[in-house]
Amino acid sequence: MAEELVLQQGHKVEQYQSILPQIQAIVEDEADVIANLANICAALRQQFGWFWIGFYLVKGNELVLGPFQGPIACTRIAKGRGVCGSAWQQQQVIVVPDVDQFPGHIACSSDSKSEIVLPIMKNGECVGVLDIDSDELNQFDEVDAEHLQQLMAMIEKFI
């Protein structure tokens, strides 16, 4: 079944308020985790136009690349390494205004300038992360963190 998104212009709060219910409608009747994660990436990229959006899933002692939208990405990330590995280890949202200032940042692309990473929690354990990169500095803030955490709550129900 083809899905069509209604894209919202304006302030990012309005954009989140429009896209999150649409994402909920897409994932609520689909049982396949990979299909849902892929559609979430596509919906976020269509709405916001960010440089890179993707999921890394915990497999053993590392994060392994899952569904994403954007250029080729790092395939495996160790716990505690880079922004994604740090968000996994700390089990908290990390907002990075300038990736060049983040100690140990993994530069999968030199075009990435700022980043936000959110852990996906299941039964008190981090099972993956949502990683979003922008090719602009200072792209992400508390508004993004707050609304993307609502998305994480959706994901935690089906992952």
Image (tube, rainbow, N blue to C red):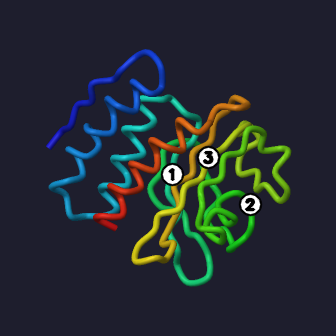
Is 100 on the left-hand or right-hand side of 68? Answer: right
- What is the three-letter code of the residue carrying label 1? Gly
The residue that mark 2 highlights is 82
- Residue at 31% of width from left, 55% of height from top? 36
Q: 157 or 143, which lies in front? A: 143
Query: How packed is label 3: few (under 14 Cα within 10 Å), some, or many (20 or more)?
Result: many
Q: Amino acid at mark 3?
A: Ile
Q: Where is residue 17 drawn, in percent x and y?
A: 35, 31
Residue sticking out furthest to the top? 10
C-alpha gap between disc 3 and disc 2: 12 Å
Q: Residue at x 78, y 39 (%)?
A: 98
Does the residue at mark 3 contact the one at mark 2 (Cβ under 8 Å)?
A: no
Residue lying at the far bottom of the rendered structure: 60
Q: Up-down: is 59 above or below 104?
A: below
Q: Which residue is mark 3?
A: 116
- The residue to which callout 1 is attached is 54
Distance from label 1 to label 3 (Cα)? 11 Å
Q: Nearer the viewer, residue 67 or 72?
A: 67
Badge 1 vs badge 3, beta-carbon distance below 8 Å: no
- Sequence order check, earlier mark of 1 and 3: 1
**Mark toward the viewer: 1 or 3:** 3
Are discs 1 and 2 less than 8 Å apart at CB?
no
* Amino acid carrying mark 2 in the image: Gly
